[in-house]
Amino acid sequence: MLNVENVNLHYGAAQALRGVSLKATAGRVTCVMGRNGVGKTSLMRAIVGQQPISSGSIVWNGKDIVALKPYDRARAGIAVVPQGREIFPLLTVEENLETGYAPLPRRDRYIPDTIYDLFPVLKDMLRRRGGDLSGGQQQQLAIGRALVTRPKLLVLDEPTEGIQPSIIKDIGRAITFLRQQGDMAIILVEQYFDFARDLADDFLVMDRGEVVMAGTRETMDEAAVRARIAV
């Protein structure tokens, strides 16, 4: 469904991505691993259209989307849960979820029950302001908001960062459920190795803007991957 080929990306004179390639397909989780500052978030920003690439191609369902704006990629079925969550702190939980209506036709502007099934706390806190939630609850809200858009590609940028273990398990169960539905491709950016390994169908490891290891979970050399992502 998604095919990223030989992507280079610059911030001014600094090169953040060097010939990066990645594939993501429906019903599978592709994990992108690496230390801080190796280009993982830059790759996600390139995929969702938040940062223009210098060269290469990003093909989604057979169409090159390099020229598409982020909102057009959202309409095409690409959703992102950004690092840091970026919810609206003064809006209620319900209003935050409703911001996901933006790319949807009017007939689809409702919150699917699946979101409350995955994250029951959101239903209990619909009238609470987003800024009053804990970090883990805000992360669940950010994922729920992305799911409101009915994505076919879900990009999760370090969803376990700063999150308590019980909610990490909830997020893991949600990702597993979404994969099992078989109609969504998932890209998971992660530094927490055990979480990534347990969820990954495919993986790649980045270092200094390049892909230095890639393969399937079955072929993963755990010791080598741990060494590459260790701080």
Image: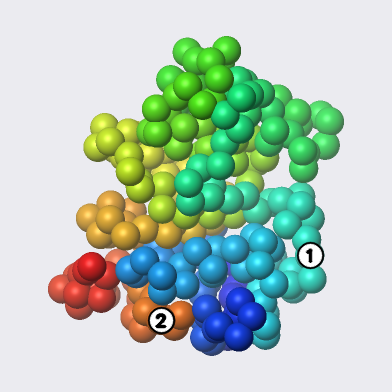
Image side of residue 112 versus residue 188, left or right: right
Could you tell me residue 231's position as x and y percent? Answer: 23, 68
Q: Residue at x 33, y 54 (%)?
A: 199
Q: Nearer the viewer, mark 1 or mark 2?
A: 2
The amino acid marked with disc number 1 is Leu
> Where is 121 relative to 195, above or below?
above
Could you tell me residue 10's position as x and y percent? Answer: 61, 80
CB under 8 Å between callouts 1 and 2? no
> Where is 127 relative to 122, above or below?
above
Secondary structure of the residue carrying tag 1 is loop
Secondary structure of the residue carrying tag 2 is loop
Dividing the picture into quadrants, the one containing residue 119 is top left
Q: Residue at x 47, y 32 (%)?
A: 138
Q: Which mark is residue 68?
A: 1
Find disc 2 in the rendering and name its residue. 208
Image side of residue 57 versus residue 166, left or right: right
The amino acid marked with disc number 2 is Arg
Specify which label sits upstream in the sequence, 1 or 2: 1
Q: Residue at x 32, y 33 (%)?
A: 167
Q: Which mark is residue 173?
A: none
Q: Residues within 10 Å of mark 2 (few under 14, many from 20)?
A: some
Image quarter (top left, top right, bottom left or bottom right) of the N terminus = bottom right
Q: Is residue 49 visible?
A: yes
